[in-house]
Image (spheres, grey):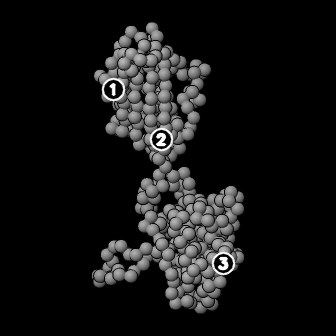
Amino acid sequence: MKVTGILLAAGASRRMGRDKLIISLGGRTVLRRSAEALLNGGVTDIIIAVSDATRQEAEALCAQYGLRTVNGGETRGDSVYNALKAADCDIALIHDGARCLVSEEIIRDSIRCAAKFGSGVAAIPARDTMWREGELVDRNGVMLAQTPQSFKYDRIMKAYRQAKDDGVQATDDCALYKRLYGSVHYSLGGVINQKLTTEEDIELFQKLTARERIGYGEDTHRLVEGRRLVIGGVEIPYRLGLMGHSDADVLIHAVIDALLGAAAMGDIGRLFPDSSPEYKDMDSLILLKRAWQMVRGAGYEICSVDATVIAQEPKLAPYINNMRRNIADAMGCDAGIVSAKATTPEHIGPEGNLECITARSVCMIRG
């Protein structure tokens, strides 16, 4: 059984006011998400009906995955018909490019139903109270059609040809199928299988496609005489300080590495090498600001920071809140999402013997 997926990407996006299929959600365009969803659902032969606005993105997908394109038409039905004419398959699966959250299960169920019953139209029962011109509508038996809508190829092709001959247009494919064959079979849809339609939808889609990533950072600096002790951007009176190329702020360095690790952007040594005179004795909070600007520029926001300093001496508790505020100020976030703690190693190991101070940190980012 050969299945061809027809991915519709030629609409005018009038309700959005801009082409919605090239909007990036979590690092991937809407069109890419839809195409890769079909591929994950086992549909390897895909024809994308494109407009001038979506052609470049579609061609990039074709080059990567071996897909095909056809020119879209003036209406949705024209685009489907153009793609159907280019297909050679047993089952045609038709999917709106704007439904980029479709699951593998929904795709596979649509195909199974089409193979067994002739049609498999993803749909869900109406869930909300409905009114028409002030009159309550009985929602019993009301189904909300989605895509994919899958059909035996010869049947849907015949339905489209008949509609063309009769001058009939429809907003979805099951209406034309039902017109010729009398009924359609519904397959499993999903509440999350929404269509990106208006500007107001973008916030929801961004939340549903957000990338949450966690990074870990660790740093150790030797305690020596003749150096300032700076931890978390706070200068702490003590007889020893930390050795390093910059101000050797062990806490800030651990946070930077955790942040860069979460975004897969390397580490502090690569970005701010100790071989560069530019960073000699530099305030590490400046380095944190620069690292955060890079991560934010990649489309991420900070979710949380947690860090622990391991030091036998001095006592750090009186300075913790200032450290939290400094980290938050450098990253432009609320101090409430920044945690900093200190612990003593009970005179065990190099930290316990006052040879060094160590800091460990984790960061969560979302993009």
Considering depth in this image, is 15 or 110 the residue closer to the camera? Answer: 110
Query: How many residues crowd mark 3 within 10 Å: few (<14), some (14–19), many (20+)?
Result: some
Say which residue appears at 43% left-offset and 76% top-offset. 144
Considering depth in this image, is 305 or 289 the residue closer to the camera? Answer: 305
Can you say whether 306 is above or below 183 in the image? above
Name which residue type carries label 3. Asp
Say which residue appears at 48% left-offset and 15% top-offset. 222
Say which residue appears at 43% left-offset and 54% top-offset. 207
* Residue 283 in sight here: no
Residue 193: x %, y % from top left: 47, 66
Query: How many residues crowd mark 1 within 10 Å: few (<14), some (14–19), many (20+)?
Result: some
The disc label shown at residue 320, or none: 1
Q: CA distance from mark 1 to mark 3?
A: 67 Å
Can you say whether 178 is above or below 122 in the image? below
Q: On the image, which quarter does residue 139 sit in?
A: bottom left
Q: For the N terminus, give its image quadrant.
A: bottom right
Considering depth in this image, is 200 or 364 the residue closer to the camera? Answer: 364
Looking at the rendered structure, the secondary structure element under dot 2 is strand
Between discs 1 and 3, the one toward the N terminus = 3
Query: CB of mark 1 within 8 Å of CB of mark 3?
Result: no
Looking at the rendered structure, the secondary structure element under dot 3 is loop
Residue at mark 3 = 90
Between discs 3 and 2, the one toward the N terminus = 3
Residue 291: x %, y % from top left: 51, 34
Name which residue type carries label 1. Ile
The disc label shown at residue 214, or none: 2
| Horizontal side, residue 291 vs residue 4: left or right | left
Q: On the image, which quarter does residue 357 sit in?
A: top left
Q: CA distance from mark 2 to mark 1?
A: 23 Å
Q: CA distance from mark 3 to mark 2?
A: 45 Å
Between discs 2 and 1, the one toward the N terminus = 2
